Each structure stands twice: as C-alpha cells, then as structure tokens.
Amino acid sequence: MSSVNIAVLASGRGTNFEALVHATRRPNTHGEVRLLVTNIPDAPVLKKAELEHVPAMLIPHRGFKTRAEFEQALVAELNRHDIGLVCLAGFMRILSPVFVNAFADRIMNIHPSLLPAFAGLQGMQVHAAVMAAGVKVTGCTVHFVNTDVDAGPIIVQRAIAVRDVDTPESLALRVLVEEHLAYAEAVKLFCTGRLKVEGRRVRVLGDDAGRAVDEGTTHA
C-alpha cells in the first residue's frame, strides 16, 4: 500500500500538527505529514515544524485580493506537493467551494465538541458554552469538511464526562488529549483505505469497523 502525502493547515500553536506528525511516524499508518501551511507569519506552529523537520510554507491570506485567489494559490501548492489528504488544525479561515471541491472527501477537521452540538464556535468559546449549558458529556469530533461550517460527515468522535469541578480551561486540556487520539485514528483509517463516505455518513470498512466508536466511549 502506497503512503499518503499529508498537508496540515494551521494558524496557531500547532499542538494537533505536532500530534499528527508523531502519529504518522508510527508503523503501518501509511501516511506522512509532508507539508505545513500557515497563513500567519508569526504562528507558533512554524517553530514546531522546524523542530519536527517538516517543510513549512507561509501563504498569507492578506496578500491576496480575494478569498478565491488565496485558495487557488493554496490548491496549487498542495497539488505541487502531491497532497492526498489535507488536515485542518486550528486553521483560522473558512474555506469556500473553491478549495473544498478541489479536495472533496480529502479534507479533515477537528472540532472540540461532539458535533452537531456547539458547532460554529471556536477554541475556548466551545468549552465555555459547554459549561454554560450544563451538559454532562463533551468531547471532540473529526469530520470531513464540506461547504457548511462544522457540518461535514463525521469520522471519529471521542467523549469525556464533564466534571463538576471543571472550568473551560481544564475542560479544554482534557478534550485536547482526546483530539490527538481521535485525529490520529481518523488519519490512519483514511490512509489505510478504510473510510467510505455515504451521503452524510462515513462507514469504516473492515472486520473491526466498530473500533473507532468503541475507543471513543465516555470516560472521566
């Protein structure tokens, strides 16, 4: 089985980028992070890419007159690197059909809630909303990206209990641990050819098709 070239798009700290790099370096993943792309000149993720010896590219969105021109440049660079899977990791740009259609069913995103709950929020906003709503269970979702925000077909979800002593900050830290695990699982499933999109659902192929769900059962 050939290896899938992966590009990570990130705008911030790069914790999920770093986790994906480490995960894809494990045996039998059949994928490798070949490129980091950021749109922010001083994004901390650039330092992580340097430390991990992953080629990094800056494509500042402010250097383009329109969103379409920015995304066309992004598509061109990813194609030049023969990218088979795009992973969004805190990429602070809403992608238009120009980009989404160019990589249909080949773009993943990680969201820090159990979608469709708390869709459309970002970062700490999500965890504050979870606490304010008084829900007992939260987690993270890896999904394919479509033209609707946080609404693409769900690949993997992992859940944790919300503790009475939690704050948005403590919840964010515990959910982040699950994000790293969920993203690694979703990428491996993709790179080993075990994901099939059927409308709004993603089917996991193989005898152990329930593993992604079983591993994500709720825990404290």
Image (tube, helix red, strand yellow):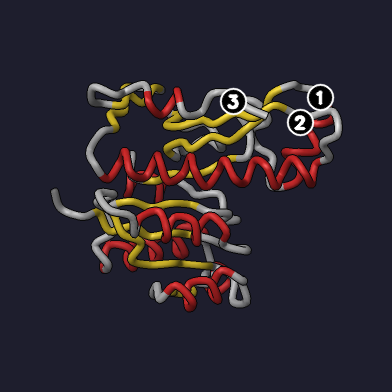
- Report the disc number at residue 93: none
Q: Is residue 196 left or right of residue 142?
A: left
| Disc 2 element | helix
| Disc 1 element | helix
Q: 10 Å neighbourhood of mark 1: few (<14), some, or many (≥20)? A: few
Quadrant the C terminus occupies: top right
- Report the disc number at residue 116: 3
Q: Give the Cα separation between the discs numbered 2 and 1.
A: 5 Å
Residue 110 locus on image (x, y percent): 53, 43
Q: Can you identify the residue that label 1 sits on? A: 133
Residue 180 locus on image (x, y percent): 52, 47
- Which numbered disc flags the more N-terminal residue, 3 or 2? 3
Vertical relation: 65 (above or below) 114: below
Q: Is residue 11 left or right of residue 125?
A: left
Residue 43 locus on image (x, y percent): 61, 71
Q: Is residue 41 left or right of residue 109?
A: right
Residue located at (48% from left, 47% from top): 96
Residue located at (32% from left, 65% from top): 76
Q: Give the Cα separation between the discs numbered 1 and 3.
A: 15 Å
Q: In the rendered image, which quarter is residue 78 located in?
A: bottom left
Question: Three-letter amino acid code at disc 3?
Answer: Pro
Residue located at (35% from left, 55% from top): 24
- Which numbered disc flags the more N-terminal residue, 1 or 3? 3
Question: Three-letter amino acid code at disc 2?
Answer: Val
Asked whether the beta carbons under mark 3 and mark 2 sit within 8 Å of each other, the answer is no
Asked whether the beta carbons under mark 2 and mark 1 sit within 8 Å of each other, the answer is yes
Q: Can you identify the residue that label 2 sits on? A: 130
Vertical relation: 137 (above or below) 120: above
Residue located at (33% from left, 39% from top): 105
